[in-house]
Structures are given as structure tokens and as C-alpha cells.
Amino acid sequence: MKNWIKAHRKLLWLALAAVVLFAALGTLTYFNHPAANAGAKHITVAVVDGARNSTLFTIPTDALYLRPALEQQNLIAGEQTDFGLFVKTVNGITADDTKQQWWCFTKGGQSVMTGVDTTPIADGDAFEITLTTGY
């Protein structure tokens, strides 16, 4: 056993370093996620389909995060995963995996780096949901 440990010492240190790194990143992500705003608010959501037609929705909500605000308007549907809702359908339009289609969420033209379950909303926020082709 001692010989095996000596032979694989670098690999063991590398594995330990990876575990420590992932734990540190998880802790940073947990404590630095954006805060949600409680209370009544109005958000706008522009849904852009594959033909680049845009439909604007104004949503009054008390929700803290984007998912419940969109679900109360029946705007989204999808598949529940370990990471939250994977949005497949927006405003009745389902992304076609065979065409490499997916829904891109942006806020003020910038990609939203969180899922719909963890994207906080504030009064006056404007989101865009665009059917995008190509991975």
C-alpha cells in the first residue's frame, strides 16, 4: 500500500486540489448569488421567435425569481432537472433539438448567467427570450 501511495502521490495531490477548488467555487457561488427583491413589481419580457417576430409581455408579479413570474403567465414549459427548469417551450413555441434550437435568455441585451429558477427580478426589469439556432 505504501508503494502505491508513493507511486501515485502527484495524482492524489491533484485530486485533493480539485476537491478543494470545487468546494471553494461552490461556496463563492452560494454567497455571491444575486439577491431577489420582495414585493409587487412589473417586468417586461420580449419573446423573439425563429422568424425574428417579437411579442412583448408586461407581467405584474410578486415573485422573487423569473420562473414563477413566467409560469403565472403560462409563458414557459420545460423539463425539471437537477439544476432547475430546462426551458423547452416559450409562448407555445417549442425549440427543436434536431435543428439545434434553444431559448436564449437575456436582460438588457446581456446573457443571463443563471437559470430561470435563480434569476432574481426587480421592478422595471426587461428580459428577452430568443429562439436561437446552433450550439
Image (cartoon, rainbow, N blue to C red):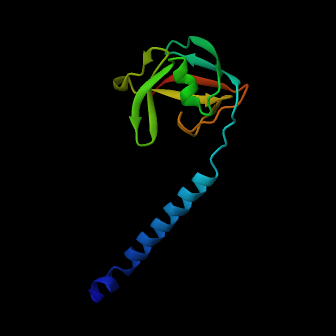
Residue 32 visible, this angle: yes
Q: Residue at x 48, y 70 (%)?
A: 17
Residue 8: percent from the left, percent from the top? 34, 79
The vertical placement of 82 against 70, above or below, is below
Name of the residue lying farthest toward the left = 1
Q: Residue at x 53, y 56 (%)?
A: 26
Q: Residue at x 45, y 14 (%)?
A: 92
Please indicate whether residue 32 sits to the left or right of residue 104 in the image: right
The vertical placement of 106 against 50, above or below, is below
Q: Residue at x 41, y 43 (%)?
A: 82
Please state the total of marks drawn on the protein image: 0
Residue 46: percent from the left, percent from the top? 61, 18
Please indicate whether residue 115 sits to the left or right of residue 108 in the image: left
Instruction: Compare residues 101 and 127 and report the one nearer the observer.
Output: 127
Quadrant assignment, res 57: top right
Residue 130 visible, this angle: no
Residue 89: percent from the left, percent from the top? 44, 21
The quadrant in which the C terminus is found is top left
